[in-house]
Image (cartoon, rainbow, N blue to C red):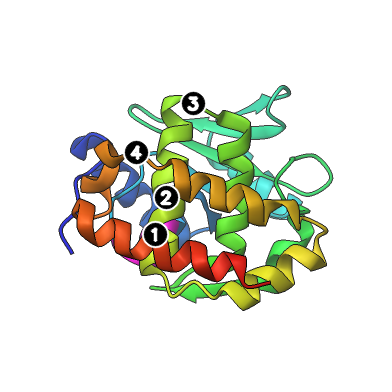
Amino acid sequence: MSVREFWNEAATRASWVKLTEIAKQFDFILIGGWAVYLWTKAHKSKDIDIVVDYKTLDALKSSFGLVKNERLKKYEIKQDSFDIDVYVSHYSRLAVPVDALAGHAAKIEGISTVVPEMLVMLKQGAEIERGHSIKGRKDSIDLLTLLIYSGFDLKKYRAMLREFKLERYEDELGRVVRSFSKDDLPYLGMNHQEFVKWKRAFLEKLKLR
């Protein structure tokens, strides 16, 4: 699979080095764009998004200068070309409760993350919130990449939607697929004909409820 990279290569390279470095030092669950990359091996990410407990948060505070972002309900570690966004329970707002993620975790290449169906839900929450921004566009690309390349299971996804009372997300997912721009197809590694065929089949599956 050959895909176009979304972010600057120097930034993604530095971010990946930092991610693998902190994965050896701290316990966390990886979400966001790098989690998408682990499942799909498609385009790389820039910022690092991690979920930690308060013990690990204290350890991060000792090693880095954490900035508390009250508006977005997260902590941030500023690096030269990227940020590390840190989410904790009883404070951060994600599509599902932070405490619930450990029950849907998986490990890839020694890094703890969440299963594709949960990652789709988290990405949907981000895409809905960020809309037509540049990061919202990347969220849409990540969502399609997960649906196509991660082994996404629609049955498991629907079960999780019921578990967290997010059934409305299924219609939102259809919206993202239907409105995906043909200009962004190089980020999926697909031509127009391939995408139309996949899109038709996926939307048919969504109808079968």
Q: Which of 72 and 68 is in front in this view?
A: 72
Dividing the image into 4 quarters, which one contains the N terminus? bottom left
**Mark 3–mark 1 contact, CB under 8 Å?**
no
Disc 4: which residue: 181
Q: Is 14 in front, or is 175? A: 175
Count of numbered circles on the image: 4
Pointer 3 residue: 132
The image shows residue 209 at horizontal and vertical percentages of 68, 72
Magenta residue span: 36-41
Tell me which residue sits at (41%, 27%) in the image.
Answer: 134
Alpha carbon distance from label 4 to label 2? 13 Å
Q: Can residue 47 be seen in this view?
A: no
**First of labels 4, 2 by sequence position:** 2
In the rendered image, residue 204, in percent from the top left (x then y), is placed at 51, 67
CA gap between label 4 and label 3 equals 12 Å
Q: Is residue 5 visible?
A: yes
Q: Which residue was labeled with disc 2?
A: 142
State how far apart marks 4 and 1 are (Cα). Answer: 12 Å
Sequence-first tag of 2 and 1? 2
